[in-house]
Amino acid sequence: MTCAPALAVHGLRKAYAGAEVLRGVDFEVLPGECFGLLGPNGAGKTTTLKLCLGLTDPDAGEIRLLEHAVPADARRARSRVGVVPQFDNLDPDFTVAENLLVYGRYFGLRAPEIAARMPRLLEFAGLAGRAGAKIQALSGGMKRRLTLARALVNDPQLLFMDEPTTGLDPQARHLIWDRLRQLTLEGKTLVLTTHFMEEAERLCGRLAIMDRGRIVVEGSPRALIAGQIESQVVEVHGAGLEDWLHVAGRLAPRVERAGDTAFCYAEDAAPLLDSLRTQGRLAYLHRPANLEDVFLKLTGRDLRD
Amino acid sequence: MTNARLFAPPALSLRFVAVWRRNFLVWRKLALPSILGNLADPLIMLFGLGYGLGAVLGGIGGTSYFAFLAGGFAASATMYAATFESLFSAFSRMHVQRTWEAIVNAPMTLEDVLAGEWAWAATKALVAGLSMLVVVAAFGYARFPLALAVVPVVLLVGLAFAGLGLAFNALATGYDFFSYYLTLVLTPMMMLSGVFFPVARLPSAVQAAAQVLPLYHAVALARPLLLGRLPQHPALHLAILAAYAIVAFYAAVVLTRRRLMT
């Protein structure tokens, strides 16, 4: 059985003040999938989300969100969608419960309906018993969880999340990840942007790496690691690196320099390691290749400010 | 965004009520200090100038100076209440707290947000105008039932100045930006619109210019109504205030679209 994608984006283009931010973006997200949009700062991730929500018009391209044409029918599409924005915009004048109540009203929900959903939302956010707490009294992790609960107030089919764990400590991040997995198990479709590779690798069934307004590659994290890059990495730094690099060039098919560190990529790291054991002054780390290596290979190591 | 979309007339829906209710819920927590704040300034001016200056001046046009000022301040207090809400408070919600951003992620449009803010600022203006009416009446300077006709007038004055405030808000770079509007637009308007003294005292060229100002028309309606008299050209004054309200709100919609959607 084939089913219509939860989100379909074709040929999306957008320029701001003459600068092209999106230059033809295509992707589809299937119902129930957790899809990641990865990319360095300025790649166009947030713009893509804004366009998908119908908050600004594309210069070209088509968007269908839960089978509604966007932006034409964006209001109806948004009524079945939840959004966790990149910047915290909880209402500081309200308590935890008032934030949920007021936000629910934007969906046309009545106070009794929202009140009925409240206990479950608070429990999901780990904020049970804190309904009356002021927003200023919450930690960063609690605020994020409340923002997530707020995005669920209308029981959406699809959730957009723009860097959901940026700025959180590891404990808070793991709790968010746990909640997002729970949502996937409940059958919700998740679309998230991130530049945390670990986050994408853990959560996303499929992801697309964006750079300079285009999608560079798309696939499951495992397939991308297997298909785009050598399986082993040896990171080397220390005095005498320059001299050793001549040797490394013969032992590894690909060597990348970033500052004082060399990244050697190979299917078989044994010859590299043998050589390094004879180099007393060089420090090295041997590890399997991960998504970050793919990301850096495809988008480069230059700083994006 | 194409020009056709940018300049399209706002598609209004009743959804704006949710935005109004959001602001009302915040206000309810601080209602008393807010009303006191709305009242204190014009009241101090009214009593200081009305009794103090009134004793020196005697009466104006057959009424006491206090009664003359009451009508002027009913209009200007309304103007300031609508202005502060649509400038400083709206800017906090739009830019600082990103409240508008959160709202439009729900099935709400920018027009819903602006209509809600517009209605809300006009409500605050109505509260300010009503508070003035109560005080003026308590001191025996309002003539009922005609003084009650001030109520719809201050609502319309509130919509006019809330629209202007929201349009200006869409251009603001920070809170400091609003001091231009307050100093260069509202303060001169206070002086030229007959709040403190009859416009007839002004040079004739200035008088003609004053008739363009929305506050002039607000005063021209509020003052006679409080004194229990019919204004001379009620339809003209109402039409000009309504035109200000509608054109300013449309400008606010276009400018805010340009700021947030392009």
Image (cartoon, rainbow, N blue to C red):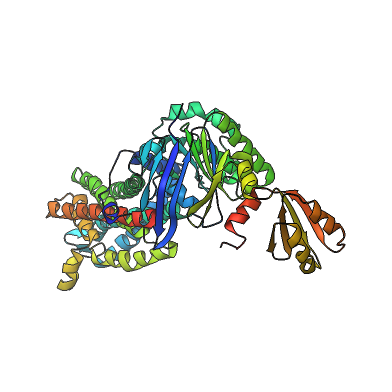
Residue B219 visible: yes
Left or right, residue B149 beside residue A245 = left
Q: What is the x, y in percent for residue B15?
A: 34, 39
Q: Residue at coordinates 61% horizontally, 42% vertically from top-left?
A: A223
Residue closest to the eye, A122 or B123: A122
Q: Nearer the viewer, residue B139 or A242?
A: A242
Q: Is residue B203 left or right of residue A12?
A: left
Q: Nearer the viewer, residue A191 or B215?
A: A191
Task: Give the vertical position of B129 relative to B13 (above or below).
Answer: below
Residue B91 pos. (x, y %):
42, 55
x and y percentages locating residue B39 in the rendered image: 37, 52
Name the image quarter holding the C terminus of chain A.
bottom right
Q: Position of residue B253 (x, y in %)?
A: 31, 52
**Image quarter of residue B55:** bottom left
Count of numbered tags: 0
Residue at (23% x, 52% y) in the render: B246
The one of A158 and B159 positioned closer to us in this rendering: A158
Q: Is residue A246 above or below residue A297?
A: below
Is A93 on the left-hand or right-hand side of B219? right
Horizontal placement of A236 versus B132: left or right?
A: right
Q: Is residue A57 visible?
A: no
Q: Residue at x 86, y 57 (%)?
A: A277
